[in-house]
Image: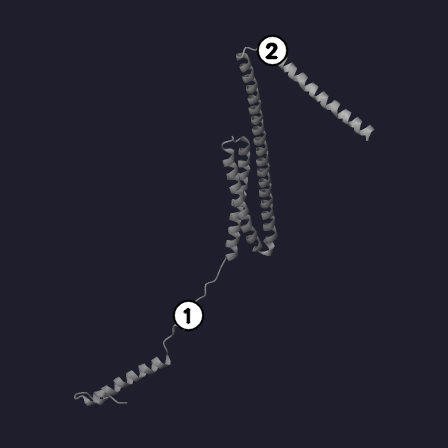
Amino acid sequence: MYCPLLKEPGFNNTLCSKKSLVRSAAAKAAADSPIPTAGSWRRRKWLPVDVGSGGRKADNMDVLYHQTNKQVHEIQLHMGRLETSDKQSVHLVENEVQARIDQIFSNLERLEILSSKEPPSKRQNAKLRVDQLKYDVQHLQTALKNFQHRRYNQEQQEKEREELLTRTYTTNGTQKKILDVANMLGLSNTVMRLIEKRAFQDKCIMIGGMLLTFVVMYLVIKYLT
């Protein structure tokens, strides 16, 4: 092996030979033990393991189920408030109840998905619990619609009653105005009664004449044709 120290004065061959041997041994050791690459380190890493994912799903379903069940009981309390609410606030209570029912239906869709992912031993029981909640909220939705229908009918009846009273008041007011005008013209109540009686008699005469004309025309058509 070539040693550059041999050309320098004052250095002996033994020292240069020892240094050269040390360097050669280090290079050989490095060649025999290659530096680990990034791929080799990656192969030695531990892969993450999903532990307890089924337990977390079960916990999420239980939490969502209890929240939804609590909302159902709260809606039942609000349904009692509907019967005692006044006309100004009943619409607000109805909107609040409907919003809560819509939220429960959204939760039920999520619960159906979670129940289908339950283990086979728990799946049937989970579906039964979800079906019971669905039945309860459908019953509440029907009760709300029935209440709204009754309230609408009641409001329509009150509106028709007010219109009838308004028309009656208007008619009575018109008759009163006619009497006032007649009194202003100096007509007495007796004269007014005679006028009303005469008008009734004229009406009877007109109806009788129409009936007589009809009978005559019928006889003419029957016996002359």
How many residues crowd mark 1 within 10 Å: few (<14), some (14–19), many (20+)?
Answer: few
N-terminal of the pair, mark 2 or mark 1, is: 1
* Image coloring type: one colour
Whether residue 210 sits left or right of residue 38 in the image: it is right
Closer to the observer: label 2 or label 1?
2
For the residues bearing labels 2 and 1, Cβ distance under 8 angstroms: no
Whether residue 7 sits left or right of residue 197 in the image: it is left
Kindly indicate the quadrant of the structure image that contains residue 207: top right
Residue with the mark numbered 2? 191
Q: Residue furthest right?
A: 223
How many residues crowd mark 2 within 10 Å: few (<14), some (14–19), many (20+)?
Answer: few
Whole-percent x, y for residue 186 in the image: 54, 10
Residue with the mark numbered 1? 42
Q: Quadrant of the N terminus?
A: bottom left
The amino acid type, in three-letter code, at marker 2 is Val
Q: Residue at x 52, y 56 (%)?
A: 54
Q: Secondary structure at mark 1?
A: helix
Q: Pick the residue in front: 212 or 91.
A: 212
Q: Residue at x 60, y 13 (%)?
A: 192
The amino acid type, in three-letter code, at marker 1 is Arg
Whole-percent x, y for residue 203 in the image: 67, 19
- Count of labels in the image: 2
Q: Secondary structure at mark 2?
A: helix
Residue 178 vertical position relative to residue 103 in the rendered view, above or below: above
Q: Quadrant of the C terminus?
A: top right
Q: Pick the residue in front: 143 or 15.
A: 143
Q: Pick the residue in front: 1 or 191.
A: 191
Q: Determine the CA span between mark 2 and mark 1.
A: 120 Å
Whole-percent x, y for residue 5 in the image: 21, 87
Residue 4 vertical position relative to residue 74 in the rendered view, above or below: below
